[in-house]
Image: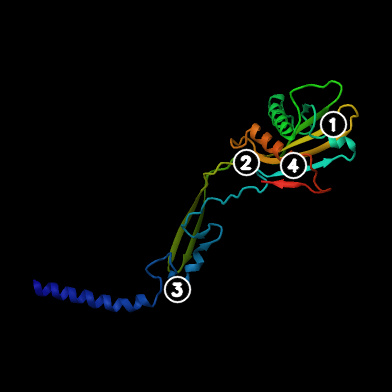
Amino acid sequence: MKTLKAAILATGITGALLVAPALEARPGWGSPWGGGYGGWGNSWDDPLMGGPIGSPISSRNRTQDSREGRVEVSRFVAQGPEAAELGKGIVAVQSDSGEGQWVPGAERAAYEAAIVEALVGAGYDTQHKDDKGGQVAELKISRQVLTPAEEKRNPVSGTAAMGVSNRGSAYGLAVNVDLTKPRTALIGTRLDTRIVDKVSGKVLWEGYATIATREGDDKWPDYRIAGKLASALFDGFPKADPVGLGAAQN
């Protein structure tokens, strides 16, 4: 019995040694996905699937819009002796919806409060009224859609491919799982402010600030947008920007 087992083992070893050179002459034979079948390795690559057959497609790379959270500012100062009164005395605040998408009164209150705070910081008295003189800060708040909201999409999609040769066939399936939520609309909010001499009606100073934010973004409630715009608008008040140029802030 021992002699028979030894004979079988010797025969198996001899067969393996005879087969080994044949395998070495066929690179990749043992792996149909790795360069096998005489150099077919690259033929399995499918650019639409993002790699070799059977490899998963990664979720889409999404970059933030460069406009998000960025503030653009332009300011102008009138020429004349009246401009010397800027930042002094009593000022009243008035607002309306401006042009574009309607901004309800409850939301405008946040912008009025932000402007009042900025005017106090600039040296104005906002607590008292002057029916005969003083200045008036007129506000307009408007919005517009810069980029529409993304449409809802199927979070799971896939691509299939099959290759056939005289040595056999192979089938691959790539699945793309994209769990990112569709982006909401990118909204541009613009705050226009001008300061008018109540007696002469002359515009002493005016400017506007804009910002782009995602609709419904919890990071950008109205009071924060209003504060950001008012702070940028009255930064260095009553300075003006060079003609045709504005300031940008992040």
At horizontal 90% and vertical 39% (from top left) the residue drawn is 80
Q: What residue type is disc 2 on?
A: Glu
* Residue marked by disc 1: 196
Q: Judge whether residue 203 can be spotted in this image.
A: yes
Q: Judge whether residue 148 can be spotted in this image.
A: no
> Could you tell me if the residues under marks 2 and 4 are in contact, i.e. CB atoms within 8 Å?
no
Quarter the N terminus occupies: bottom left
Q: Earlier in the sequence, mark 2 or mark 4?
A: 2
CA–CA distance between discs 2 and 3? 46 Å
Q: x%, y% of residue 250? A: 66, 46
CA–CA distance between discs 4 and 3? 73 Å
Residue 151's disc is 2
Q: Residues within 10 Å of mark 3 (few under 14, many from 20)?
A: few
> Could you tell me if the residues under marks 1 and 2 are in contact, i.e. CB atoms within 8 Å?
no
> Could you tell me if the residues under marks 4 and 3 are in contact, i.e. CB atoms within 8 Å?
no
For label 1, the SS is: strand
Q: What residue type is disc 3 on?
A: Gly
Q: Earlier in the sequence, mark 1 or mark 2?
A: 2
Q: Is residue 113 above or below residue 53?
A: above
For label 2, the SS is: loop
Q: Earlier in the sequence, mark 4 or mark 3?
A: 3
Which label sits in the foreground, 2 or 3?
Answer: 2
Question: Which image quadrant is residue 237 in?
Answer: top right
Q: Is residue 171 above or below residue 65?
A: below
CA–CA distance between discs 2 and 4? 42 Å
Residue 38's disc is 3
* Residue marked by disc 4: 236
Judging depth in this view, the residue of 12 and 235 nearest the camera is: 235
Which label sits in the foreground, 4 or 1?
Answer: 4
CA–CA distance between discs 1 and 2? 45 Å
Q: x%, y% of residue 165? A: 47, 67
Judging depth in this view, the residue of 245 and 99 nearest the camera is: 245
